[in-house]
Image (spheres, grey):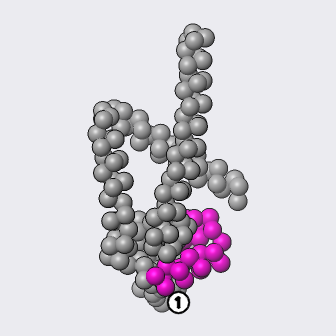
Amino acid sequence: MSIENKKNRAELIEALFQASREQSTRTIMFHQALTERLGLNATDHKCLDILSRTGSITAGKLAELTGLTTGAVTGVIDRLEKAGFVRRAKDPDDRRRVVIEISLDKAEAAFEPLFVSLGEAMNKLLSQYSEQELAILLDYILQTTIILQEETKKLK
């Protein structure tokens, strides 16, 4: 590899770091604006997102998945329950335990209209890439997610 290619590679990597930082900030700002419209906060929304993917889980499991304290998760569940997005229910397998159930219909009705424009813009953007390029983008995002999970654990 030539010195010029190394410089270009180093510059590209630096540009990717900077672009990733900006994307992270813009993602947080988007979710903050979106959740403010619904009277929630970004943490509530992300917990709701986790529940939409996991199905019914205990508050302890939600704390484990988010890295939040059980006390913080209780507050999240209280707010989501008050807004009608979740409910506490007896675990059908162990009546002594309580699980958090999401009201998918209510959550989808509230959130989906707010994502329409973003979804359309992202589909338009992604349509410009080949299948091979999309696979590279997907790999980058998946690997970044793993790194972020590991680095988050180190901070706890």
Q: Quadrant of residue 63?
A: bottom right
Please tell me whether residue 103 is drawn above or below residue 7 in the rendered image: below
- Which residue does the image show at 54% across and 26% down from the upper left? 12
- Which residue does the image show at 41% across and 35% down from the upper left? 136
Magenta segment main secondary structure: helix
Does residue 76 appear anywhere in the picture? yes
Could you tell me residue 121's position as x and y percent? Answer: 33, 48
Could you tell me residue 46's position as x and y percent? Answer: 50, 65
Does residue 104 appear anywhere in the picture? no
Find the magenta span and give its range: 61-83
Could you tell me residue 145's position as x and y percent? Answer: 52, 49
- Residue corresponding to mark 1: 96
Does residue 84 belong to the magenta stretch?
no
Closer to the camera in the image, 69 or 76: 76
- Which residue does the image show at 58% across and 53% down from the upper left? 149
Could you tell me residue 59's position as x and y percent? Answer: 55, 77
Please tell me whether residue 139 is drawn above or below residue 103 in the rendered image: above
**Which amino acid does the dot numbered 1 rest on?**
Arg
Please tell me whether residue 106 is drawn above or below residue 126 in the rendered image: below
Disc 1 is placed on an element classified as loop
